[in-house]
Image (cartoon, rainbow, N blue to C red):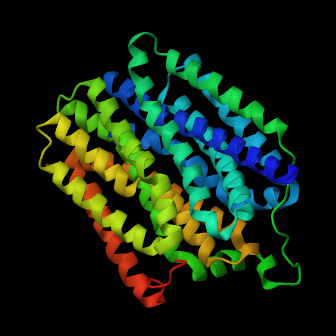
Amino acid sequence: MQQDTYAKRRFWVLVAIVSISGFSQGMLLPLISVIFERDGVSSSLNGLNATGLYLGTLLISPFIEKPLRKFGYKPVILTGGAIVLISLMLFPLWKSLLFWFILRLFIGVGDNALHFASQTWITSNARPETLGKSIAIYGLSFGVGFAIGPLLVPLVNIAEALPFIVSTVLCLVSWALVFTLKNDKPEPIDVKSANSNVWHRYKKTLSYAWIAFLPPLVYGFLESSLNAIFPVYALRREFDVSVVSLILSAFAIGGIITQVPFGTLGDRIGRYKVITFGLLGGGTMFLIGSFLESYQWFVFVAFLLAGMCCGSMFSLGISFMTDLTPKELLPTGNLLCSIFFSVGSLTGPFLGGAFIEHATMSYLLLVALLLFTVFVIISLGGRKKRINNQKGF
């Protein structure tokens, strides 16, 4: 009984940590984009600067699994949180493209350590019958934070440093909660097994669950591109800054509404069916939104509905990967989820910035095209792996 109580408390502490991390990311992307746009920075350079966060996530990924297996979850979460905290504190000290890019790089390193350890901790201890729901709550906490983050962007009109200060204080409070947890380590690997070789683990995990890594890639693209590039695109179309913040929050709120229902539905009818429905629905909403850009509130509705369809892609991808992967390879699977998320996040701002710089079509068409493409790949891949009719998937 006491162990069950502690397990619940540990779960909610991890949920709180991730929600504040989501808040910081949700605030940083549009906030810095708006600041640079006001300073006359080009959209391509603005988008390239935004990739710093995800470049840091990608760079640290190959090196993070070994410390997790050696030292356990708690030290990795504390280290990641400390890196994020220090980086946030340094933003107001000096406004420079290069300096802020480096800080975003370090935040990517810290966030990846924090997320990788916390989501592996949850997936390793969740019961199979409630796995989807547990990961959905985890994703929901990030989504709530990410939805609230952009609402702080208008604070830049009061003082440019104010949003950074608020974010730092909240991160400090959540980081302190981790000290109340007992450390734990992942399932050990048999040193005589072929799985003890890191590159073999990557290859083996990809062979089991490659299809499950595409939803995190999609979510990474959407999260970074919409929050870093859409504000620039919208301001050039003379959208009001406050309305842009609301539109970005609408996408995150949509994901919040469906996160737990989709996760629970995935437990019942299979993640594959829920994922393909979400991709098709999200692509359709963005396609419709591209024809309604003259009406700011119609775009708001399109983002809300698209968020309802696609806002669960990361958590569904993690649950799907857990279904398909042996338990001793779960840390590697979670790591690959982070890597694919980072690849999507890196390409999002860069492609989005280049698109609005050189293309005459609606930016939302680019987003819709990505979703439709991945829908086709997963549909064909699911049939090939014969998993689309299996309830657990």
Q: In this view, does 302 lie above or below 310?
A: above
Q: Residue furthest top?
A: 158
Q: In this view, does 256 lie above or below 120?
A: above
Foreground residue among 139 and 70: 139
Residue 343 in view here: no
Query: Could you tell me if residue 84 is visible in this image?
Result: yes
The residue nearer to you, when weighing 299 against 190, is 299
Q: Position of residue 24 (x, y in %)?
A: 54, 33
Describe residue 204's horizontal placement relative to residue 290 as left or right: right
How many numbered tags mark residues here? 0
Q: In which quarter of the image is residue 197?
A: bottom right
Would you identify the image quadrant in which residue 245 lies?
A: top left
Counting from the top left corner in percent of width and height, residue 123 is at 68, 62
Place of residue 201 in the rendered image (x, y in percent of width and height, measured from the top left)? 71, 76
Task: Indicate left or right for 78 with 146 as reference.
Answer: right
Q: Please state if 157 lies on the left or on the right of 68 as rendered.
A: left
Q: Which residue is drawn at 66% across and 70% down?
A: 128
**Where is residue 390 shown, x and y percent of the image?**
50, 84
Which residue sits at x=30%, y=40%?
230
Q: Which residue is drawn at 70% across and 69% down?
A: 330
Furthest residue toward front = 1
Task: Please report the residue visible at 77 percent of the width from the left and 40 percent of the height from the top.
Answer: 78
Left-right relation of 320 to 302:
right
Instruction: Please tell me in which quadrant of the rendered image residue 164 appears.
Output: top right
